[in-house]
Amino acid sequence: MAVLKKIRSRLFSSGAGHGEETDPEGEASAAGAAQDARWRYDVRPLTAAQLDECWRLDHRCFVDGEAYSRETFEYLLTSPESVSYRAVTPDGTMVGFIVGIVEPDQTGHITTLGVAPEHRRRGVARRMLLKVEEGFRRRGVRITRLEVRSVNAGAQDLYLKLGFAVTQRLPRYYSNGGDGLLMVKSIV
């Protein structure tokens, strides 16, 4: 819990995670302030009502053939075990999504996380991850897990910074033969 409080204080006291660009000293530049106003994101629940929009965004995020089918998204979003969110711009455009499932052993499994390519590196994924952890906690989850491509160093770095640890290499985990890594985090 102390780690999460520290992360939250860093995120919200400095503006990080809200799309704000800062200079190396941590001061917001004029250009950064303009960028912040343009790229403000709201994290809201993701439901079956946004199924088609989410599915289309998934195909933009995962162009390597790893995008989920529409039927898989429908199953995930209508499941009573689903804990899912979307990031939207002020005009309501979905630019990110995260889908988690509470498994029978009370583990929270983040099954997918995607951010539109033009909105990456602006704190969107971080905010959605923290939100899904809150949702998991409300459902009694104490451990969360996810799988990530072994070659996706950017995502791995974010997960490590948020307290995840690599627990296992998953040879040929992805349909294109790529390896995955299982990452786990305690959220108590």
Image (spheres, rainbow, N blue to C red):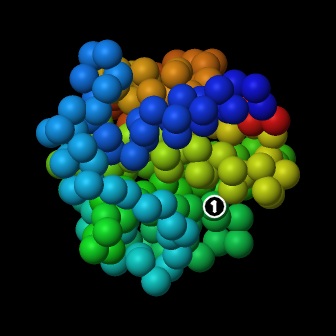
Q: Residue furthest left?
A: 31
Front in this rendered view, residue 112 or 20: 20
Q: Quadrant of residue 41?
A: bottom left
Q: Amino acid at mark 1?
A: Val
Q: Which residue is mark 1?
A: 83
Question: Where is residue 134 drawn, in percent x and y?
Answer: 69, 50
| Side of 58 relative to 117 (left or right) | right
Please determine whether, in this image, residue 170 is positioned above or below residue 141. above
Residue 174 on image: x %, y %: 39, 37
Q: In the image shown, does 170 or 63 lie closer to the viewer?
A: 63
Residue at 32 percent across and 50 percent down: it is 115
Quadrant into which the C terminus falls:
top right
Residue in the image at 35% along x and 22% along y:
26
Q: Residue at x 54, y 29 (%)?
A: 10
Residue 160, horizontal then vertical, whole percent: 52, 21
Q: Tell me if residue 180 can be seen.
A: no
With 115 as the anchor, is 131 left or right in this view? right
How many marks do you count on the picture?
1
Q: Would you identify the image quadrant in which residue 157 lies?
A: top left
The residue shown at (52%, 39%) is 12
Which residue of the protein is positioned furthest toward the bottom in this rendering? 49
Q: Does residue 110 lie above or below 23 as drawn?
A: below
Q: Is the residue 64 above or below the residue 53 in the image?
A: above
* Label 1: few (<14), some (14–19) or many (≥20) C-alpha neighbours in 10 Å: many
Callout 1: SS: strand
| Whether residue 141 is visible | yes
Instruction: Locate residue 159 relative to residue 79 in the image: left or right.
Output: left
> Where residue 148 appears, x then y in whole percent?
45, 32
